[in-house]
Amino acid sequence: DEALREIARAQQLDPLSPAIRSNFATTYYHARRYDEAILKFTATLDIEPQFNPARAGLALVYAEKGRLQEAMAVFQETLKANPADTGVLAEIGRLYGMAGRTDEAKNTIAELSRMSQRRYVSPYFIAVPYLGIGDKNQAFEWLEKACQDRSWPMVYLNVEPKFDPLRSDPRFQGLLKRVGLLKQ
């Protein structure tokens, strides 16, 4: 609630900023208030149609609502605009897994691994498709590597909805402690 109040104040100060509007929508997403997040992401895209963070955020919300085809279409459009975005590629792999397209999800994991041979790919992004196919052990293995790498997306671990299937596992609580999101 405090985050929503603060981001609402930021939007009052700069009502046309696509970054602030997108962050407002992301805050709703993290609060699992998906319908409000969709409205905010859509409003952001009405003002700035090519703003990729808003497109990717909208796709994340669609995925959490089970609207996998819509999520895939938006992620594909986002990837087309920035083919080097490993985060979006990872999410596409997660969607394949969620849709039961395990071979395509595994192909995405292989592609991310190949990319990591040429440049840095956060282990966090390799963990994401494993969530889609329900392979918790591999997801944890890669999240541990992301923790060791101090990978920036790990700061969202405690609020990111895609990790909800892992929350009841004791390994998740340990991971949150190592990242610094839970007191020891």
Image: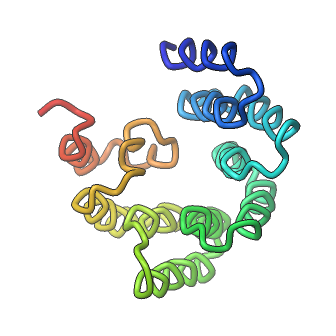
Q: Residue at x 50, y 19 (%)?
A: 3
**Where is residue 151 drawn, in percent x and y?**
34, 57
Farthest residue, direction right? 46
Side (left or right) of 52 relative to 105 = right
The image position of residue 150, as x and y in percent, is 28, 55
Horizontal and vertical percent position of residue 123:
37, 67
Q: Position of residue 164 (x, y in %)?
A: 45, 43
Of residues 82 and 64, the one nearer the viewer is: 82
- Tell me what residue is drawn at x 67 percent, y 36 percent: 22
Q: Nearer the viewer, residue 77 or 144?
A: 77
Q: In which quadrant of the rendered image does the C terminus lie?
A: top left
Q: For the point 47% across and 87% down, which residue is it? A: 114
Numbered circles on residues, count? 0
The colouring scheme, among rainbow, by chain, secondary structure or one colour, is rainbow
* Relative vertical location of residue 52 with respect to residue 129 in this rendering, above or below: above
Q: Is residue 176 left or right of residue 21?
A: left
